Amino acid sequence: MEQELISKKDLLHEADISYGQLYRWKRKQLIPEEWFIRKSTFTGQETFFPREKILERIEKIKQHKDDLSLDNLAQLFTKKVDEEPHFQNISLSHLLSSEMISQATQDLCQLELTNVDILPYPQAFTLFVIEEILSSGSCSLEEAKLILTLLRDQEEGFIHKPFALFVTRKLGVATAILLHQHDEVYFDSASKIITNLSLDELQERFKQKLLTHGGIS
Amino acid sequence: MNTERKPRLSISGAATVDGGKYQEVKIAGQGTINEDLDTIQLTVNGHLEGLRDIVAESMTVNGRLVTQRDLSAKKARVNGLVKVWGDLHTPQLRIHGEVVGKKNLTSESIHIYGSLKLDGDCNTDSFTGKAQFQIDGLLNADQIDIGLYGSSSAKEIGGEKIIIKKGRKWDKLLPWLQSELKVECIEGDYIELENTQAKIVRGKQIIIGKDCTIDRIEYQDSYTAHTDSKVGEAVKI
């Protein structure tokens, strides 16, 4: 898929940021190295960016930069959760007490969680997804269990790659689907899409809550 | 591996040791460390060769330190020579001698009264001093304020405030010393240059001082150039 590019000059102008900010954000790894695309133009080398991604990212940086430090922001965007000490060993009781997850979610997922308080990141995030689904009220408990099974099976994949979670219902039977966020997907007209969640966005929210509430032991 | 820190490792004479965790490591003679070393304080007065990673809270090198892998020191002072084949991570770095890095250097504050040679990128909040440097990648810093002594180069320089001037101190003493900076591209919000050769300079406010050769300048707010300098074209964006 050919993505639309924006030159550095246009980006500074359009997003209203300075060279200093852009270089600082690059240095703090808020903007991934691979988004800096070099091309030769008639005035020499110029840097281009994938337009949509960079504008969206800068919007988010601007949004959060008053309440989170640049280092925290970098943690928010990182895909390398396993290298980030803030996201290791998340305490279940803390998630409950800071109301990041509810009792209902814990009960639903309880099967394997008896007497364990410290959760690895993927498990904790799975709880957060279930919480989101239950609190949205769109799925029944049975359907949430279906989603839970799917997420547990695919735990490694959806943490590191941008996935979207779809739940469809046809003739009263629900199906949960995980697919790459930017892929297109079509359903037959009898299927009703009851949930469409971007796990990437949800992960950002989850990390932000972890960073602001603690929840880390 | 034992996680307790041993109090002290001291080498005077010549010795090869395994590594490990220490409170204090002092090298007076010649030492080789075969495994990872993790210490609060590292002092090298002689010659230390590390075959694996070295981690220190605070490091002073008066002699030579060569390491085959990564070096990380929160506070580092180099009076002699440090040569690192891996990445160099030194939040507070003062160079009074020479630092050679084969990969990237990440820091918060770099102060140089000597020389820095890097094959990769240099990322830091501030980069100041009187220096001779050669950075084959990008020099990325919020604040750059350098007096040039000897010939320096970088592939690219980017940041907020970039001030490059000719070091004046040795003008009369060493008149043959060519102090100049060669760089492909400089981008910043405030840029002040002397003795610089660049293909392109982009910024908000650009002041070109003496003895510069710049092919193209793109500025947003203001631009001035000394009559001794050659500027191919200057365009307001």
Image: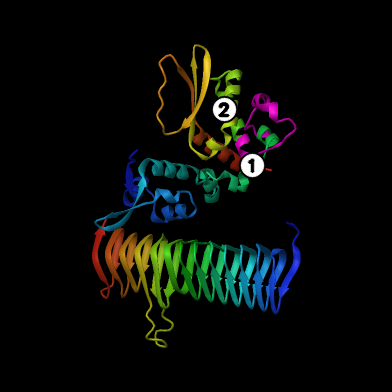
Which residue corresponds to the image point at 50% horizontal and 35% vertical from the top-left?
Answer: A201
The secondary element bearing badge 2 is classed as: helix
Which residue corresponds to the image point at 58% horizontal and 34% vertical from the top-left?
Answer: A155
Marks 1 and 2 sit apart, C-alpha to C-alpha, by 28 Å
Where residue B76 appears, as percent x and y from the top left, is: 59, 68
Residue B4 placement, left or right of B149: right
Which residue corresponds to the image point at 56% horizontal and 32% vertical from the top-left?
Answer: A154
In the orientation shown, which residue stands out farthest toward the top? A171
N-terminal-most mark, 1 or 2: 2
Q: Name the residue tied to disc 2.
A: A150
Q: Over which residues does the magenta segment extend?
A: A97-123
Chain to which mark 2 belongs: A
Which residue corresponds to the image point at 31% horizontal and 57% vertical from the top-left?
Answer: A45
Question: Is B135 placed above or below A45 here?
Answer: below
Residue B43 sits in which quadrant? bottom right
Q: Quadrant of the N terminus of chain A?
A: top left
Q: Quadrant of the C terminus of chain A?
A: top right
What amino acid type should be assigned to the residue bearing mark 1? Gly
Residue B230 placement, left or right of A191: left
Q: Which mark is residue A214?
A: 1
Q: Which mark is residue A127?
A: none
Where residue A132 appears, as percent x and y from the top left, is: 56, 28
